[in-house]
Image (cartoon, helix red, strand yellow):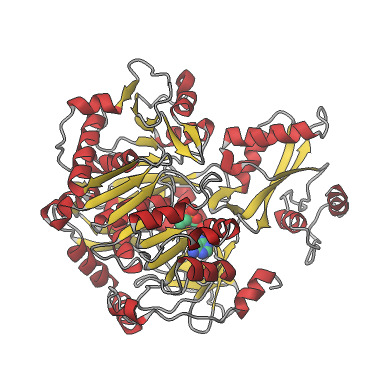
Amino acid sequence: MSDPTIESLLQENRHFPPPSDFAQQARIASFAQYQELCQEAVTDPEGFWGRLARTELHWFSPWEQVLQWDPPQAKWFVGGKLNLSYNCLDRHLETSCRTKPALIWEGEPGDTRTLTYEELHQRVCQMANALQELGVKKGDRVGIYMPMIPEAVMAMLACARIGAPHTVVFGGFSAEALKDRLNDAGARVVITADGGWRKDAIVPLKSQVDLALQADQVPSVAHVLVVRRTGEAIRMQEERDVWWHEIQQRVSDDCAAEEMDSEDLLFILYTSGTTGKPKGVVHTTAGYNLYTHITTQWIFDLREDDIYWCTADVGWITGHSYLVYGPLSNGATVFMYEGAPRPSAPGCFWDLIEKHKITIFYTAPTAIRAFIKMGDHLPQARDLSSLRLLGTVGEPINPEAWIWYHRVIGGERCPIVDTWWQTETGGIMISALPGAISTKPGSASLPFPGIQADVVDAQGLPVADHQGGYLVVRQPWPGMMRTVYNDPERFRRSYWEHLQTGDGHPLYFAGDGAHRDAEGYFWIMGRVDDVISVAGHRLGTMEIESALVSHPAVAEAAVVGRPDALKGEVIIAYVVLDNQHQPQENLQKELMQHVVQEIGALARPAEIRWTETLPKTRSGKIMRRLLRTLAAGEEIAGDTSTLEDRTVLDRLREGA
Ligand code: WTA
């Protein structure tokens, strides 16, 4: 391992015990208590998860069996009936939560809204009734393409309430990407808004929906429910499009929650993989509800009076699990912000923390690195003393950024939970419990109780301490994905066929590299497959390559990630033009724009490099490893003997 970041991580040995005043009041208050929970979960997993499901959730009727495990197919709480929207709303109306803010929201222009649990419940019931009026029945899929406004949360909860699986598509995805996802899910209704605010500009959402649906490209969609946010002029298509504020006038604010089976489909969320189109990750009701509920409670150490802010967009799994479902299931007060830090108000996040007295703040390393660049004077000019706990997610955090976060934002008093997980895992898998586990900058620390994470070699055998390997999970857990929508075979192939134990048990393959230190702490090293992470957004190289190749000038393309101090990685595309086209600067721009159109601005290549050929193995596979090394400006070491044409490398080097 000669990677400099790995070297520096291996030498990282600072550690930060839980502050004693924090630990004294924490939900999980000592390492011994953490170990006891782990012990309970190992000796009797079904007893452990069953106990939590009984005490933490409301059930219409109990389950008959905690777990049915027929690898890779898991069924949790078999035969039980519950409703996630009921668990997030109705049950809190009988407690002091009723009049407590569920959602405190601020828009980019500075407008604010607060909804108590009672008010949120009414709005969700109204939206559920609106969906039913538009013909949505239990089992029908609903697309959600929304800005970060309270109606996005209402839309998700309304779907869960009537048993209509949602598929939220991040507002930064293009019409083309939206069309593919709506088609794959077979959505019947799309919920959107005229637009939303992001970085001082209006993101036009409804017009993208119009583009996606034009010429009957998504035949399953019968209606579009449109929320007015920006007041921009938009086109409403008669019969198809309905304004939310109009339908809201006539629907009741009471709607019984559907009794859902534990394993009923809750939502589909598309994410990038190694091959082909994004896959629809499927999560079901009970396991997901329990797992996001309990991880939120223990990892964020939720207390009655917390004001909890997770900066993720609802379009990503973090928004699903830790902005909406986990915190609301616990009856927490969630703060939600519409926009992103922007040049005209670089300190706005710190203003928001001061103004709303945020106590828990959960964000991504790429955001932290951007904050560092904007300067310490911004947070230092604000009173951040309300904060008591910080979190990070999405990519490995470099120790320098961790220390800055700890010192400048956390005032050296707030523990930091570095949480490792994935769209597929539903909830956090590896993280410190802040009152119980010491943290080390750059390490996600230890697995959550009940999670059997490990690092193994290509044969599935555990590796020694400090040895790199593949991150795997040995046992099923309630929040795990159940399948790839419409493609169970891909589910098996992508996650369960790479590795198995010596005696033939399949292991869940996360696609990440990792190593463990002598204390069992996990250090995540990033993806081992062709998935890249740009500003914490997960993208498949193949997806971007297909977008490039769909341009008439492009004969072939290979895409790799290049390390970037701010974004983690940026996209470098090697492009072979067909013989009708010449390399030109405006063609570079055109291709970048083409990718934006096909996928969205998040996939725009930072650089397009022309080349006459790509390095391939004799069997024709593109050797992305070599391109990655070249893109990073490093010397090619290691084995290149499988390369079909050795002169390719020299030519690529000259070209660069
Ligand atoms: C990466 C986001 C290091 C990892 C919740 C994983 C991380 C992918 C961490 C999943 C972390 C997430 N440390 N790497 N704390 N958290 N990752 O599906 O590569 O968008 O496989 O889910 O992000 O990305 P996804």
Q: On screen, 96 above or below 136?
A: below
Q: Position of residue 17 (x, y in %)?
A: 43, 81
Q: On screen, 163 above or below 55?
A: above
What residue lies at 48% left-to-right and 83% top-to-bottom? 519
Nearer to us in this view, 114 or 86: 114
Nearer to us in this view, 148 or 55: 148
What residue lies at 33% left-to-right and 46% top-to-bottom? 105
Snapshot quadrant of residue 433 = bottom left
Q: Position of residue 428 (x, y in %)?
A: 40, 63
Snapshot quadrant of residue 474 = bottom left
What residue lies at 56% left-to-right and 37% top-to-bottom? 599
Q: On screen, 408 above or below 426?
A: below
Q: Is residue 286 left or right of residue 322?
A: left
Q: Can residue 501 be seen in this snapshot?
A: no
Q: Position of residue 175 (x, y in %)?
A: 51, 31
Q: Is residue 593 left or right of residue 23?
A: right
Snapshot quadrant of residue 154 = top left
